[in-house]
Image: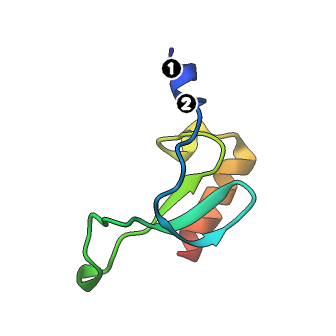
Amino acid sequence: MENDKLHKEIEPFNDISIYETENFAVAVPKVPHIPRTDGGHLWIRAKNRYFNNRTELEPNLAIEVMRLTLLI
């Protein structure tokens, strides 16, 4: 069951994408949790699968997420 949850189809992005790699998109949510005046809110979304944190990813994908985290 847990495996199915992690590998279900990704919903279309409704966010404003500001940077993309082959596997991930850095995006600004249309309705951010933190207002821009307080620093804003960005997130990194996988293009092909859901994940809650990088420990659920294969090592090469986890490294890519860490690099994106440093970038933004």
Residue plotted at (37% across, 66% down): 30
Vertical order, 63 against 31 (above or below): above
Percent x, y of residue 67: 64, 66
Percent x, y of residue 20: 66, 67
**Amino acid marked by disc 1:** Glu
Name the residue tied to disc 1.
2
Vertical order, 43 against 39 (above or below): above
60 sits to left or right of 71: right
Residue plotted at (46% across, 63% down): 15
Percent x, y of residue 35: 25, 75
Percent x, y of residue 23: 70, 54
Of residues 37 and 53, the one nearer the viewer is 37
Q: Secondary structure at mark 1?
A: helix
Task: State if disc 1 and disc 2 touch (CB < 8 Å).
Answer: yes
Tag shown at residue 30: none
**Amino acid marked by disc 2:** Leu
Of residues 63 and 23, the one nearer the viewer is 23
Residue plotted at (60% across, 67% down): 68
Tag shown at residue 6: 2
57 sits to left or right of 30: right
48 sits to left or right of 8: right
Q: Residues within 10 Å of mark 1 (few under 14, many from 20)?
A: few
- Distance from disc 2 to disc 1, alpha carbons, whole Å, reads 6 Å
Q: Residues within 10 Å of mark 2 (few under 14, many from 20)?
A: some
Q: Secondary structure at mark 2?
A: helix
